[in-house]
Image: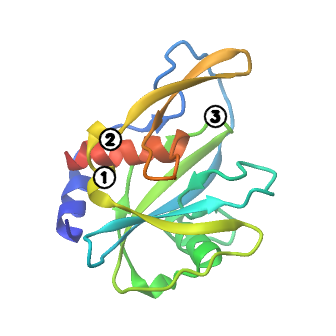
Amino acid sequence: MGPEALLAALARFSGESSDFDLNPGTVLPPGRKLRPAAVLIAVCEGAGGPSVLLTKRASGLKHHPGQIAFPGGKIDAGDASAEAAALREAQEEVGLDPALVRVLGQLPAHETVTGYTVVPILGHIRADFTPVPEAGEVEEVFRVPLAHLADPANFRVERRMWRGVWRRYYVVPYGPYYIWGATARMLRGLAERLA
């Protein structure tokens, strides 16, 4: 599955997503202020076929320790765009040179339970590179075959108690990696477009 298939997937319409998609009873406060963020869904080519680059956050972090995530973070005032923020964060977190990334476009924004509106940037990595995890921030950098993430049958819904209520969310496990929450929901959106 090359860049052309990914571009075709981007052209298919779908609405924005959120951590509340599977929890229709959630009442969100009107006028809430969401902080802007961006992540890079980096599709890498390889001998085994295309794969998606993911990180395992360091276990000592204050926010989301040990969770699986895309490279990315808050959009800073100095960032020219969501794309610029995603590329900057990917360079900081995994050592990905922005010159190696062909930005294909944006997926619809995703609202998180932590108060962010996250713009997923879909990018194709033009050449092989050796990830360099950011010390203290990223515990591990790994890849998951795009074929696994593009198959809606690999996703399931689980639930856990959160702030006194049951919260349902998507998961897409891969080997020892438990990919869930916002990351899994954004991947599910991509899978729906690729299906």
Instruction: Pick whichever, 97 or 11, lies toward us.
Output: 97
Relative to 25, is 152 above or below?
below
Q: Is residue 156 above or below residue 5?
A: above
- At 55% from the left and 24% from the top, the residue drawn is 159
Q: Do the residues labelled 3 and 1 touch (CB within 8 Å)?
A: no
Label 2: which residue? 154
Identify the element where label 1 is drawn: helix
Relative image position of residue 168 (x, y in whole percent): 52, 24
Who comes first in sequence, dot 1 or dot 2? 1
Disc 3 designates what residue? 113
Rendering coords of residue 117 (x, y %): 57, 45
- Of labels 3 and 1, earlier in sequence is 3
Q: Which residue is disc 1 drawn over? A: 148
Q: Which residue type carries mark 3?
A: Val
Considering only vertical position in the picture, is 160 above or below 156? above
Residue at the image position 51 percent from the left and 52 percent from the top: 177
Percent x, y for residue 17?
Answer: 44, 36
The percent coordinates of residue 51 (x first, y second) are: 34, 66
* The image quarter in which residue 41 lies: bottom left
- In the picture, measured across the screen, residue 61 lies left or right of residue 195, that is right
Mark closest to the chain's N terminus, 2 or 3: 3
**How far separated are the C-alphas under marks 2 and 3?**
23 Å
Answer left or right for 53 relative to 154.
right
Q: Distance between the residues labelled 1 and 2?
A: 7 Å
Q: Is mark 3 on a helix, strand or loop?
A: loop
User: Is the Cβ of the residue at disc 1 closer than 8 Å to that at disc 2?
Assistant: yes
Q: Which marked residue is nearer to the observer: mark 3 or mark 1?
A: 1
Decide: marks 2, 3 in contact (CB < 8 A)?
no
SS assignment at label 2: helix
Front in this rendered view, residue 126 or 59: 59
Tag 1: residue type?
His
* Residue 8 can be seen in this image: yes
